[in-house]
Image (cartoon, rainbow, N blue to C red):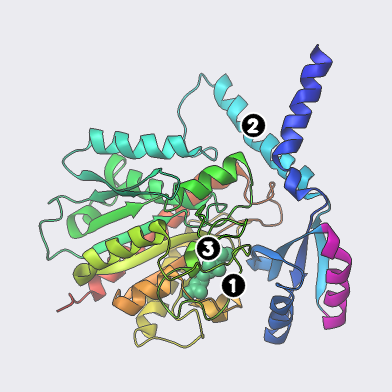
Amino acid sequence: MKVLAIALLFVAVYAKHEEYAGYKSYFVGQKNQAQQHALQSLENEFQLDFLGRVTSSQETLVLVKPEFQAAFTKSLKAFGLSYRVHADDVVKALQNDDRIIEEVVQEKARNGGARIPYDNYQPLSVYDAYLDDIARRYPNVVTLVSPANSFEGRPIKYLKISTTNFQDTSKPVIFIDGGIHSREWISPPTVTWAIRKLVEDVTEPDLLERFDWILLPMVNPDGYEHSHTSNRFWRKTRSATSIALCRGVDGNRNYDFAWNTVGTSTNPCSDTYGGPTAFSEIETRVVRDILHENLSRMALYLTMHSFGSMILYPWGHDGSLSNNAFALQTVGVAMADEIFTHSLPNFPRYSVGNSLLTIGYGASGASEDYAHSIGVPLSYTYELPGLNAGMNGFILDPRFIEQVCRETWAGIVVGARRAGDLFVPHP
Ligand code: 0X9
Ligand code: ZN
């Protein structure tokens, strides 16, 4: 009986990641732009999935299907790109992540079940309950808004945090979202941590006096749920917009900014599918509407992604700079410097710059570009820290969640204050 139970458990655990059977992940080094382009050019041919950049070593982590591994490594050699295997067996690596996550759950159980939401990755229900609970407990400063349901019918919720219920229109607004790319699990907790620091554990009271805040931790709840229950590397929404078998649109290719032109795909099966039209997704329309409703006084927009320890700003489709590039760079550097002073020694230092030039590829239809194009003066994509030598876990050991939240908050504090100093209301 016991043997059967263990066998069933094994089958269940294995089945969870079975779509990655035979996959390997590789670190690929790129020394210059030509090599970056060379790697990028292999994306479609070998159906590569770029998981992110390890900034300290300037290596990109790439997921490769079994049938393409031999040809992929051959092409790397032909281009003179260095590479090394990261996970020889991706299923095993994911199971190892599951074990690390489960260990923390066990530890917590031994500690008497205390609720410590930042010591592990949380299911969607925990985020949902948290937003409801905060709104209930702090009705004077927090308003819960649930403007629409996701494709699969889950409420997309955000909080408006304000000492005047958004009535003092002289205050600049700061908007932070997370979770558009569902597999980037470190993103939503950085947004809920900001809620905590504005409402529950206030150490910077000026931030609530000076600004109104909009915090949307989970733009893509369907994708998040799917990445927890079925496919760990699910990035897109879960919409069924075409007759094709493949579901989902890359939310960060779906905004109406140079839509469908660069670093995006028209193939619904691609991870960077931009959708049938710009704003085809309810999830991106919710963000769009928040931007427009508050545009006249929005001073700062941050969208949380992972990973790579980068602060990116427009324009991400062609690498050109906006008229506000000087402010974007200086405020970006101020945020990165502050994060650095709160960081751990083994964390990579943030780099700051134009999206295309810093991340190494162009991408159109991204939210940070859209926000800036309609007039948000300071608009950034955060690529939060992730995998790094000395860290365990395929993506980010859950023991580092709280650290990332704390240091990211330090960056937000500086960014908000700078944004407030620079802000001139729109006519
Ligand atoms: O590719 C993306 O959407 C972002 N990177 S991620 O690894 N989180 O997927 C980067 C977006 C950069 N911004 C622009 N291209 N504007
Ligand atoms: Zn992302």
**From which residue to which does the magenta span run?**
66-80
The amino acid pointed to by label 2 is Glu
**In terms of sequence position, does the residue under pointer 3 or pointer 1 come before the other?**
3
How crowded pointer 1 is (Cα within 10 Å; few <14, some 14-19, many 20+) is rated as: some
Question: Residue at left 59%, top 29%?
Answer: 105
Residue at the disc numbered 2: 102
Residue drawn at 28 percent across, 61 percent down:
290
Q: Nearer the viewer, residue 423 or 330?
A: 423
CB of mark 2 near ligand 2 (< 8 Å): no
Question: Nearest the camera: 133 or 29?
Answer: 133
Asked if the beta carbon under badge 3 is closer than 8 A to the nearest atom of ligand 1, the reply is: yes
Name which of mark 2 and mark 1 comes first in the sequence.
2
Residue 78 highlighted magenta (yes or no): yes
Which residue is labeled 3 in the image? 250
Residue 265 — which label? 1
The residue lying toward the viewer, choosing from 238 and 40, is 238
Where's residue 84, x and y in %?
83, 64
From this viewpoint, is residue 36 visible? yes
Residue 210 location (% of width, % of height): 19, 60
Q: Using residue 96 as the reference point, say whether residue 403 is left or right of it.
A: left
**Amino acid on which the number 3 mark rests in the picture:** Asp
